Image (cartoon, rainbow, N blue to C red):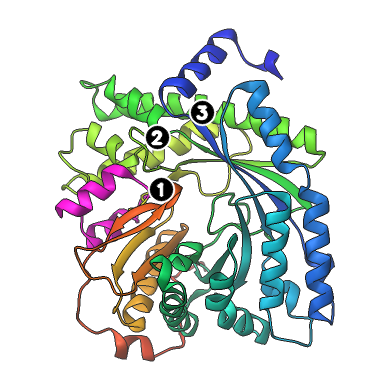
Amino acid sequence: MSGYFSPQEILETIRMVQMENLDIRTITMGISLRDCAHPDLATAASRAYDKICRAAGRLVAVGEEIEREYGIPIINKRISVTPVALVAESAASDAYLLMAQALDRAAREVGVNFLGGYSALVHKGMTPGDRALIASIPEALAVTERVCASVNVGTTRAGINMDAVAEMGRVVCETAQRTAAADGIGCAKLVIFCNAVEDNPFMAGAFHGIGEPDCVLNVGVSGPGVVLNAVEKAPEADFGELATVIKRTAFKVTRMGELVGRAASAKLGVPFGIVDLSLAPTPAQGDSVARILEAMGLERVGAHGSTAALALLNDAVKKGGAMASSHVGGLSGAFIPVSEDAAMIEAAELGAITFDKLEAMTCVCSVGLDMIAVPGDTPAETIAAIIADEAAIGMINRKTTAVRIIPAPGRQVGDHVEFGGLLGRAPVMPLNRCSSAAFVRRGGRIPAPLQALNN
């Protein structure tokens, strides 16, 4: 594999790893649990546990082996599984907590930090199994450590299921209350999507799509520090030249990601899936997407021009990745989480970036409203309306959007929540206090936008 890369590329990669925080954010093994379904839920859960342990038993060891061989940090090793609502529905029981606990035990047994796929796809309606899973999410996220949940409530072709949106508003609030002792951390493991993708390796929204093979290896690369360094070295470049600089950088980062992905795939004996080139920040200094936008000339992220700067960044990252690999997938772009980005935290504390500006920026970012703490007394209907707004952006713009929001129990604007690690810390941000309750109560489905009117 090393012959595929020139000596100059190898030296550049070493420099980026050592000086610019370049890393593989995650290698995520996708595992189908469709063959684990059984009329007895305990049996289905046991089958899922056994299959995960069998398929992913060497995942962590292989990741560590690749780190040693190539000198490239692999920060997380993760698993995604078939949306559990599809697997558990054939059981007579709707006590899905059994499945969540089995998945958590399996994740702990194989040593991964997160397992995604406690999920339901309800963009056009809900089956009894979907309803049972959604109802179980708050307790499941409270009693497990590594399980992540997601629900897809809309698509460009189906519209937005507002009944599901209203229910997810209540689920988010209940999840926060059940994990109140840890600042509502359960909500950090819950994502509500529009246009969810089947091969996303990033948590908390990863699940193994029904169009995927039985087992697959996907890679999530992250290089905000590398892109920041490249932008800082081009202070006089116009925007066309700056886009080219970012594309070239994204090309190099994607090549490294495919190298690691294919190496891990070969060692594990499973197919290689995709490289997700998403600039995923961390609270570490110099590992910030917000700093990239500021390096383009903004005093602070959130200033007028932030949306345009993010649009350029996201597009250039995608174009550079597409040139580097035929297997770019997942979300691929730039994430703008508040709690996970040091410069974003600073901007929120100073009031430079507001909730409404974050929503505007989701029109052009990789996903959506991410890791935002809001007052703990925020009504469920307000949370649901936020989900609806974000889903509408995704539906109309034919892109993936998502909401990962934390109504922090007992906290008000100006307070902070502390999650630690990659989840970071977040200032509690103000929301519009006007009621959306009557709007959310209407229910039904917001129709899909017109795709074509052909004669």
N-term mark: 1 or 2: 2
**Residue 424: x percent and y percent?**
38, 50
**Residue 308: x percent and y percent?**
26, 44
Query: Which residue is labeled 2 in the image?
Result: 224
Residue type (three-letter) at the residue carrying disc 3: Val
**Residue 298: x percent and y percent?**
18, 38
Query: Looking at the magenta stretch, what is its main secondary structure?
Result: helix
N-term mark: 3 or 1: 3
Magenta stretch bounds: 340-365
**Residue 107: x percent and y percent?**
68, 56
For the point 41% across and 27% down, the residue is 226
Camera-side residue of 331 and 81: 81
Residue type (three-letter) at the residue carrying disc 2: Pro
User: Tag 3: Cα neighbours inside 10 Å, few (<14), some, or many (≥20)?
Assistant: many
For the point 32% across and 87% down, the residue is 439
147 is higher (above) or lower (below) than 44: above
Can you see residue 102?
A: yes
Magenta includes 446?
no
Residue type (three-letter) at the residue carrying disc 1: Phe
- What is the CA distance from the residue labelled 3 to the residue labelled 1? 16 Å
- What is the CA distance from the residue labelled 1 to the residue labelled 2? 10 Å
For the point 41% across and 59% down, the residue is 397
Query: Which residue is labeled 1 in the image?
Result: 335
Q: Are marks 3 and 1 in contact (CB under 8 Å)?
A: no
Q: Is mark 1 on a helix, strand or loop?
A: loop
User: Tag 2: Cα neighbours inside 10 Å, few (<14), some, or many (≥20)?
Assistant: many
For the point 33% across and 39% down, the residue is 312
Q: Is mark 3 on a helix, strand or loop?
A: helix
User: Tag 1: Cα neighbours inside 10 Å, few (<14), some, or many (≥20)?
Assistant: many
